[in-house]
Image (cartoon, helix red, strand yellow):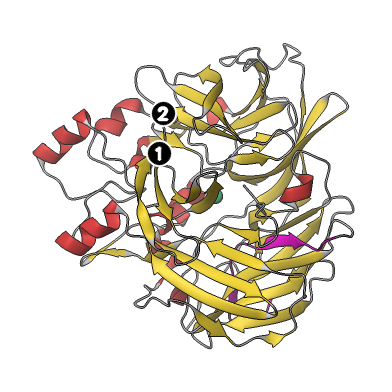
Amino acid sequence: MDHRLGFEPVRGECAGVSLPVEGDLPNWLSGTLLRNGPGTFEAGDRRLNHWFDGFAMLRRFAIRGGRVTYANRFLRSEAHEHVREHGELGFREFATDPDTGLVGRLERLLAPNFTDNACVNVEARRDGFVATTESPRVVAFDPGTLATHGTTTDSTPGATRTVHPHHDPRRGERVGYATRFGRDPGYTIYRTPAVGAEPEIVGEVSVDEPAYLHSFGLTERHVVLTEGPFVVRPLDLLRDRPVIESFEWRPERGTRFLVVDRASGDVAATHRAEPFFVFHHVNAFETGGEIVLDLVAYPDATVVDALSLDNLRSPAPDLPTGALRRYRLPIEDDGESGGGASGGGAPRIGFETLYPGHIELPTFDYERRNTRPYRYVYGVSNRERPPADFQNQLVKVDVGTRTTRTWSEPDAYPGEPLFVPAPEGQEDEGVVLSVVLDARAERSFLVVLDAATFAERARAPTPHPIPFGFHGQFYRDDEPTRSMA
Ligand SMILES: [Fe+2]
């Protein structure tokens, strides 16, 4: 078997099994890795179209006293329960729509049927843990048992919201954005204070045609929205087609950076670059009157289609290269690149390539370095460029020296690496945790790498293969901070 095993459904749920541990875990490593991602890719006897459509299954690795316990449980979202009860899709997913006739389409016009299939990330909130997707509907769960508590709808405005809000420990707030379609299209940036449950609006940006945004950059004083030219055709949202098919690539628009002041909510600067597409920002910080913004860039939005299950389940999927780039954005708007949110002008912001090979699911020492200068990026990667296989190695990029370290082994397909810092030491003193599919052994394992050397310290095999997932967080026992917001 090869990487395709990672797109096969999981049939069983583990309530908490002790895993064998090969190697030694650091004695300071004590906490819970909670991860999210699809557990099945079917709705009744119908196959879903896209990796992002799969039904959420939570994974939990509790690491304590040198031991590892594993559990997995499907999220009992309304979307998933509908399939279990009726054998067919009840909600519109990312790239798969329910089979509905005219009545269904009319109902959708009156009340958009947001899915609560929250398969992308998890968040620790003041009042508990939730699983998230880009819909405003989040699903609360118990981090100990993974039992589902129920679905609630965030009060943030807009039709979609980011699954990558930023956590700012110095201000004690969470910052995110929502995208508004319809009559007053644009982006609403919000913050949720540490005390107080309700989000407050930081600022609003109006645009004619909202783009698909997946994440954003945060500095001490600014929010950066990177608006690629993958924009919505508003009327198409009302037609009988999956959400993502309502977006089209319009390269003549270029990619815009909207720099928003976190204090005033105003657009402080708008800059334009040659067109590119981004899912994931890495880090951003301010220095010398400019914002340094690191992200993973694709030449265009074909990566969205490339993550269809038809392509991913082929023996050699055709995947574009995501490159680690650094953009430098003047904080003051100089007028040359078009002032205001609707400004035009020729592209003038260039970039440096920090790592030319493929990288995705990028992470760093979020807890200590977010919004600050930093040195190390971790990500999934490929030994080949362009990728000739699914993600088959982990990479650590030193953005200072532009050198890299990698970890890989035959038939092993790693997921998002999360850095967990040691109690004290240099920026890369700590470990990197990743859930790896071992296609040859037909199971997965949690791998623990020494973050400095990228050598393996330990691994803990799971009883079954775990499908490829997206994001997760590590919550330390002594201080439940986030590896990445
Ligand atoms: Fe993401």
Element at badge 1? loop
Residue density around tag 1, few if under 14, some if 14–19, many if 20 or more, within 10 Å: many
User: Does residue 367 appear anywhere in the picture?
Assistant: yes
In depth, the one of 418 and 304 nearer the eye is: 418
Q: Name the residue tied to disc 1.
A: 136
The CA distance from mark 2 to mark 1 is: 8 Å
Q: Earlier in the sequence, mark 2 or mark 1?
A: 1
Element at badge 2? loop
Q: Name the residue tied to disc 2.
A: 158
List x then y, in percent, for residue 460.
62, 82
In depth, the one of 268 and 57 nearer the eye is: 57
Per the rendered image, the range of residues in magenta is 408-423
Would you say 84 lies left or right of 405 here? left
List x then y, in percent, for residue 316.
50, 70
Labels 2 and 1 touching (C-beta < 8 A): yes
Would you say 134 lies left or right of 392 here? left
Residue density around tag 2, few if under 14, some if 14–19, many if 20 or more, within 10 Å: many
Would you say 303 lies left or right of 64 here? left
Rendering quarter of residue 233: top left
Amino acid type of disc 1?
A: Pro
Amino acid type of disc 2?
A: Gly
Q: Is residue 421 magenta?
A: yes
List x then y, in percent, for residue 443.
50, 83
Q: Residue at x 31, y 41 (%)?
A: 114
User: Does residue 314 appear anywhere in the picture?
Assistant: no
Residue 218's place in the image compared with 303, above or below, is: above
List x then y, in percent, for residue 334.
76, 13
Q: Residue at x 72, y 66 (%)?
A: 432
